[in-house]
């Protein structure tokens, strides 16, 4: 009982968000694989992230199709598998007819930063969003010109919806 009372008093002060723990695990595995296997190891991690992202996208597509809906960007946002509101502080907007999401705070990036492993975390960030969208609907296009794990002040995810 004493432990439960103390845990209640402390709250989340010393807790790490699960997604931050995931980022720290990812960074640690990535670091070890690259240390042991060099460039081949880095390439293997990149391919694994892409494979993971494509699989996530395919699973989102299955949900959308099972509901009798089309694989549109709108449905991607509605039925996506990531609870982004719990891990990101972001602002969506429309720029030149394209959907743009500006991320100013990210639990994944914060976890990488906390362990001083941004260089390893950026591998995940460089590949994941493109891969998920590709798995969901390869006809949709995303640009990610700014990534916090690469040292940028924000992440910019630009979903190209306007005909060029």
Image: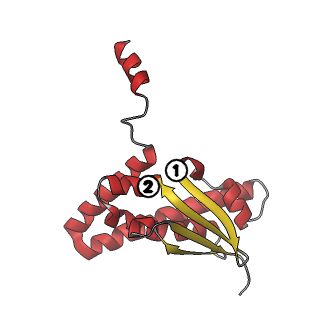
Report helix, strand or loop for mark 1. helix
3D distance between C-alphas at marks 1 and 2: 8 Å
Image side of residue 161 versus residue 150, left or right: right
Q: Pointers 1 and 2 in contact (CB under 8 A)?
A: yes
Looking at the image, residue 20 lies above or below residue 92: above
Looking at the image, residue 78 lies above or below residue 120: above
The residue at the far front in this view is 153
- Across and down, in percent, residue 104 comes to 52, 60
Residue in the image at 38% along x and 47% along y: 21
Which color scheme is applied?
secondary structure
Q: Which residue is mark 2?
A: 108
Mark 2 or mark 1, which is nearer the start of the sequence? 1
Looking at the image, residue 21 lies above or below residue 31: above
- Across and down, in percent, residue 162 comes to 73, 80
Locate the N terminus by quadrant.
Answer: top left
Image side of residue 42 versus residue 89, left or right: left
- Across and down, in percent, residue 8 comes to 43, 22
Q: Residues within 10 Å of mark 1 (few under 14, many from 20)?
A: some
Q: Which mark is residue 87?
A: 1
Looking at the image, residue 133 lies above or below residue 1: below
Q: Residues within 10 Å of mark 2 (few under 14, many from 20)?
A: many
Residue in the image at 46% along x and 52% along y: 107
């Amino acid at each position: 009982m004493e432990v439960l009372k103390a845990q209640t008093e402390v709250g989340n002060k010393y807790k790490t968000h699960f997604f931050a723990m995931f980022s720290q695990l990812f960074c640690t595995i990535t670091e070890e694989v690259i240390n042991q296997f060099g460039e081949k190891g880095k390439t293997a991690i990149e391919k694994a992230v892409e494979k993971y992202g494509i699989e996530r996208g395919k699973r989102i597509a299955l949900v959308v199709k099972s509901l009798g809906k089309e694989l549109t960007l709108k449905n991607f946002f509605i039925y996506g598998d990531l609870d982004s509101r719990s891990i990101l502080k972001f602002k969506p907007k429309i720029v030149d007819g394209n959907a743009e999401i500006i991320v100013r705070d990210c639990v994944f990036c914060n976890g990488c930063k906390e362990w001083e492993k941004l260089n390893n975390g950026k591998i995940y960030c460089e590949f994941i969003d493109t891969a998920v969208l590709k798995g969901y609907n390869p006809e949709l296009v995303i640009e990610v010109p700014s990534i916090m794990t690469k040292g940028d002040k924000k992440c910019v995810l630009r979903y190209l919806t306007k005909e060029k």
